[in-house]
Amino acid sequence: MKEMMLIIMAFIIFILMFILPFVPGIFELILKKDAAPLFISMEYIRNPRYFGRSFKGLLHKATAGFTLSPGLRDIRLSKDEKIEITGPLNIPAKKEINNMLYIIGGLISGNNVQYKKEAYVIENADIGHDNTIQAMAGDGNIVIGERVNLLRWIDANGDIVIGEGGDLGISVSSDNKLCLARNCLFRRLFGMPIATGPDWLGTIIDSVELESLPESSHRRLSFKRKTDTSVPQGTVLYENVVFTGDVKIGKDSVLKGSIKSYGKLTLEENVTVLGNIFAEGDIIIGVNARIGGHVFSQASIYIAGRTVISCMDTIKSVIGKKSIRIEQNVIIYGYVTTEGEGKIL
Amino acid sequence: MEVVILILKIYLCFTVFVLMVYSIRHFLFTLNRLFSEQRIYYQDIIDSDLKKITVMIPMHNEEKVARQILDLLVAGAYPYDNEHVDPKKILDLLVSADYPHDKMEIIPINDFSSDETRRILDDYAQHYPFIRPLHRYKGDRGKPAALNEGMKIATGEIIVVFDADYLPPKGILKDITVSFHDPEIGAVMGRVVPVNTQKNFLTRLLDLERTGGYQVDQQARYNMKLIPQYGGTVGGFRRDVVMSLGGFNTKILAEDTELTFRLLVNGWKVIYANRAECYEEAPETWDVRARQIRRWSRGHNQVLFKYLWPLLTSSNLSKKEKTDGVLLLFVYVIPLIILLALFDCIALFFLGEMQIMAGIIAFIFIGVYNTFGNFAPFYQIGIASLLDGAKDRVLLLPMLLFNYFFNTYYIAIGFLEAVVDKITGRSVKWIKTIRFRNKDSEAPKPVKDIRGTANRER
């Protein structure tokens, strides 16, 4: 009898031990606390001007119900906010702005002004040195002095010009010119074009005659895999090429297709690539390069002076996972982004 | 008798070795996703110079789902009732669609349908000039044959394929197509997410399986420059390349896996896009799941027989790609190996010959394997769920045991069928997975939340 009891006890313990791991799952099956499908945004589209457009969309929606007369109003964007609606505004130096701004006109801001909330400027904005800006959207041009501290983003329909030493937050975007001076730090830039250095600022950009880079043979079907570590000076390559390791493209070479490297890719002076550039390692682009397509690195990108990437009315991207460093006098038509640090040298 | 016992023991040791290799593989992939540097996909590339694409949707009696996928592709919006929508709204939706319609054509392939599919496709073609249905009532049936015929009339440089039950989000065409700027990419695979997760016990288990398979397995392979697999839907390939390689093989049930290996041995790369996420309808009954997994196993093993040697001897692949390729090819053989090992163990037990290793070594080995080896696939799925920001669904992990035994049985049958195919050279018949969505209802809508967005961006 005792033995029988022991066997029954052992059996019950076995059953309990067997069932135990399933108990939490059984509860989850009944309660369905985490049963919804993983969320996919069905409407999501990549847009380099997302921040500005989304903010303006929310703002216009929130202010649609009342006339835009000057004064402090309560509105609801993603949360309840106070917004100051005003005409053209001239903010003296060292002032602290605590409310969101809706400026029906232009904005002139002195030095050392701190914007604690977003600002929307219908006309041009002229921002002094050492300003701290949460986020700013503008329908006109935005000119910003030296050492701006941008906490989130700036977006303008017109040109954006930013002085030396700015920390450019998450994103700076414009459908027109985006001119950046020395020592600016960035994560994402979008401009048509993005230009660095004093020589390219202002009207000079319009007079630069950019070589038109035609639809090239980089769309051809095949590619050649090469183990070479260098391409001699003045070489012309007509096909897409994949290099299996580090490679250096000699100066004055012309690559009519796309190029990919599984190591570090170096373009010496005056190299033209009509297609795209991909590399698993760093990409070093030498002086006076002309690139027709995208530049994409799983590591870092360095772009030397007098380089032009893409051409008028064509958006291409420069993406360096770890960092992007851009010298003075570079023009890029399109989008630049890095997960690491971007810097104008 | 001694020879038999020796063979049984050797087989058991072989099984243990194979299981160890696959356990290590699971751990490597999972640890890679947790701690290693992640390679970025090309999704951030913004381009005004888009390639011309053809979206192909093979359809055999798909009246339940045809409207929904076409609506999503046409308008880039969530499904709406096309018969009652304001025409002006359609125009707005067209304008807001992500991929320009002059760079896109949609070829829904009506493959011997006997239901309303033909009429639905013709209706859409009347409204949208870029929808060009292909009606097939001659020739071989099945997805590979349908795709081959579709490719002949396609004008797109890139072919993007969706199964008819899929719900493509607005930006997915660009996300998939952008990778073809890389000159050596032959095919790209996106991520499949079940939309009917909460339907029943089976769909919840399948959701976990998919999570592990994509969030960890495929992404880790992409990170480690191994062999992500083109899965035949939510993916794209270069039309000219695939046509120049002879199109899809109609004699193989896993045309997607076959294409993966054909591209690889011919020097092209296949990559994975974790960001290109798309909802699918997972099987809701066990018999439908059984047929699906059996077909996958049969097709995958046909590919194994065909490509093992070309893979090993290809000069276009690195050693680590070959190693991963071999392990990938044998994935659908493992269940049979395990099943045979179970019988092997029983035989050895009753023969009193279970003691293969002596004393402490056996103890340590079994202890280590039970602690880590058996844990490996569960660890992978658990971590994948964690990366997705899911919480309570991880509690279902032990229940994957049921799925494991179920899959083992049907995969083993699929393997044996593939062996018979190989020996007899018989032709295979494509069997479509049954849809569960109600014909007149909208696709199930997911609950919006922000789980795991950062990790799923990768």
Image (spheres, rainbow, N blue to C red):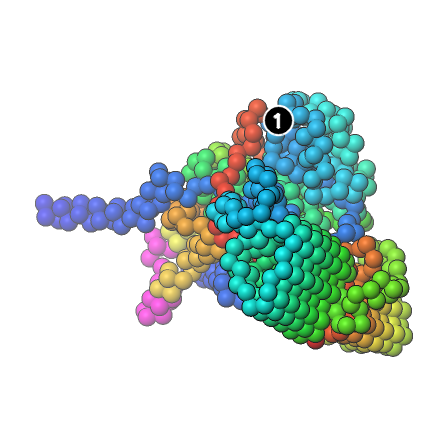
The quarter of the rendered structure image containing the C terminus of chain A is bottom right
Residue A340 at x, y percent in the picture:
60, 68
Choose top left, top right, bottom left or bottom right for residue A316: bottom right
Choose top left, top right, bottom left or bottom right for residue B6: bottom left
Residue shown at the point (87%, 60%) measured from the top left: A213
> Which chain is mark 1 on?
B
Q: Badge 1: how crowded within 10 Å, few (<14), some, or many (20+)?
A: few
Choose top left, top right, bottom left or bottom right for residue A160: bottom right
Residue shown at the point (68%, 62%) measured from the top left: A126
Residue B180 counted in the magenta span: no
Please give the range of residues in magenta.
B347-366
Q: Is residue B168 above or below residue B357?
A: above
- Residue nearest the observer in this picture, B308 or A75: A75
Residue A24 at x, y percent in the picture:
33, 47
Q: Is residue A101 left or right of residue A283?
A: left
Secondary structure mostly seen in magenta is helix
Name of the residue lying farthest toward the left: A1
Residue B419 at x, y percent in the picture:
60, 45
Report helix, strand or loop for mark 1: loop
- Residue nearest the observer in this picture, A74 or B52: A74
User: Is residue B404 at all visible to an observer of this figure?
Assistant: yes
- Residue nearest the observer in this picture, B280 or A42: A42
- Residue nearest the observer in this picture, A161 or B112: A161
